[in-house]
């Protein structure tokens, strides 16, 4: 079966890998001109980690990973005011816990299929026309082509979802925050193995030291209404300048480093909420179907696990998409719905909107210094009550 996968981020290459293992013929397309690099540092654990291990890429991810020993909250002078030992997460996860740039994870996943399947970059779908025999897909560049199935793995703002699903315009739920991330070389302040955060009411900026004298930076700020998506790089930088310039700590130095950066990631904190993940011969996976929000910390793992479950369902159904898509949603949707509900309020922890909320957040974080409290919170956070199909 010829299966078109749209999106070469996390879910797309994972799905392509497993479909190929099961004897299908996947084609992978991506609107970017090359595999995406950079991005924010993510924590990676649970069922996504299990999928990576079964793909044989765990040693590579461990080589790319960074060890974070401390989450440190500082005031405007850089003095530590709260924080906790990050070792508790590795202890609860049984060493199945990594911190690494999202771009490194995407690169390793793409390498697992590079040269083995047909791949097209700088390509976008413009139309989908399906009948009982297959799907005709129109592209921005080139002639239409025929496939038996189309899978949208193209993220929160999925083009496949817009083209093929009636709910497309109503399914993105804005959660009241925006995030941005970039990296820079030669930043003067480095606290090795510490994730250092500075928070003011409604906003937070954080940094982490990378290899080769590079540093990664992460912004989050509250925003009552969506800003829209028509912002180019200069407009995004200007928005961050407005929010963080002159706000204390290292904000001005970080914004100066941002001036010379071209790898800025900027997007709304939002969730995808769909009643159905399939429409005929078209299905969705990853953030296109069930984004829990970037702040939940498990989007990549859920994308990989969902891709694995979908490929396994197609294999078990011998390519019968109606049976496979129904099984995929029945098995995986209750689990991710629970994850999404738990993630809806995470913005409060990162950037409380009031001074009182900020004081309460800091107090809560200080309690994490108590080992039994930290262990209980970590166990709740990392617990994945889901068994991957064999």
Image: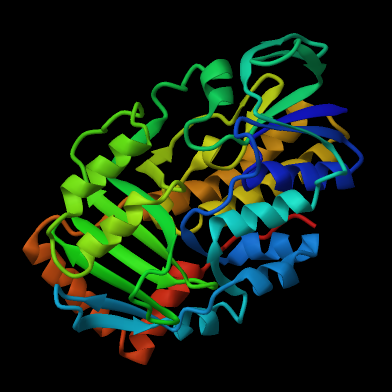
From this view, report whether residue 246 is shown above or below residue 270: below
Q: Position of residue 87 (x, y in %)?
A: 47, 85
Question: What is the quadrant of residue 374 in the picture?
Answer: bottom left
Question: As rendered, which of 297 and 243 lies closer to the eye?
Answer: 243
Residue at image point 63% right, 61% down? 47
From this view, report whether residue 272 is shown above or below residue 132: below
The quarter of the picture where the C terminus appears is: bottom right
Q: Position of residue 167 (x, y in %)?
A: 46, 21
Question: What is the quadrant of residue 81 in the picture?
Answer: bottom left
Determine the residue located farthest toward the right in the rendered image: 23
Residue at image point 48% right, 73% down? 213
| Residue 174 makes an appearance in the image | no
Question: As rendered, which of 369 and 236 lies closer to the eye?
Answer: 236
Residue at image point 21% right, 34% down? 225
By what rule are the colours in the image chosen?
rainbow
Q: Position of residue 218 (x, y in %)?
A: 36, 59
From this view, report whether residue 46 is shown above or below residue 12: below
Q: Position of residue 184 (x, y in %)?
A: 43, 61
Question: As rendered, which of 311 and 9 lies closer to the eye?
Answer: 9
| Residue 19 makes an appearance in the image | yes
- Give the side of residue 203 with respect to residue 25, left or right: left
Determine the residue located farthest toward the bottom in the rendered image: 371
From this view, report whether residue 370 is shown above or below residue 362: below
Residue at image point 33% right, 83% down? 84
The quarter of the picture where the N terminus appears is: top right
- Give the side of residue 283 with respect to residue 234, left or right: right
- Give the side of residue 101 with respect to residue 260, left or right: right
């Amino acid at each position: 079966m010829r299966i078109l996968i749209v999106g070469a981020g996390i879910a797309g290459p994972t799905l392509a890998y497993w479909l190929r293992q099961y004897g299908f013929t996947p084609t992978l397309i991506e609107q970017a001109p090359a595999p995406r690099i950079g991005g924010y540092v993510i924590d990676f654990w649970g069922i996504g980690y299990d999928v990576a291990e079964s793909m044989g890429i765990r040693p590579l991810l461990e080589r790319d990973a960074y060890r974070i020993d401390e989450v440190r909250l500082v005031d405007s002078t850089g003095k530590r005011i709260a924080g906790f030992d990050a070792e508790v997460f590795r202890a609860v996860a049984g060493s199945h816990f990594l911190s690494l740039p999202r771009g490194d994870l995407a690169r390793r996943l793409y390498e697992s299929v590079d040269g083995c399947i047909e791949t097209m970059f700088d390509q976008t779908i413009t139309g989908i026309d399906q009948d009982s025999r297959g799907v005709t897909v129109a592209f921005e560049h080139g002639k239409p082509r025929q496939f038996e199935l189309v899978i949208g793995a193209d993220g929160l703002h999925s083009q496949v979802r817009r083209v093929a699903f009636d709910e497309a315009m109503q399914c993105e739920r804005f959660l009241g925050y925006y995030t941005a991330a970039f990296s820079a070389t030669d930043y003067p302040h480095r606290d090795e193995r510490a994730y250092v955060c500075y928070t003011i009411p409604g906003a937070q900026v954080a940094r982490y030291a990378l290899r080769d004298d590079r540093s990664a930076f992460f912004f989050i700020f509250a925003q009552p209404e969506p800003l829209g998506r028509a912002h180019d790089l200069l407009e995004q930088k200007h928005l961050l300048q407005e929010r963080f310039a002159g706000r204390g700590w290292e904000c001005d130095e970080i914004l100066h480093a941002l001036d010379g950066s071209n790898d800025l990631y900027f997007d709304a904190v939002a969730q995808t909420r769909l009643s159905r993940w399939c429409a005929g011969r078209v299905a969705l996976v990853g953030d296109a179907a069930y984004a829990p929000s970037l702040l939940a910390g498990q989007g990549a793992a859920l994308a990989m696990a969902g891709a694995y479950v979908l490929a396994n369902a197609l294999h078990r159904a011998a390519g019968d998409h109606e049976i496979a898509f129904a099984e995929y949603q029945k098995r995986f949707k209750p689990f991710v719905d629970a994850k999404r509900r738990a993630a809806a309020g995470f913005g409060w922890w990162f950037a409380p909107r009031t001074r009182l909320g900020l004081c309460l957040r800091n107090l809560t974080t200080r309690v994490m210094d108590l080992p039994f409290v930290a262990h209980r919170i970590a166990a709740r956070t990392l617990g994945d009550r889901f068994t991957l199909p064999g």
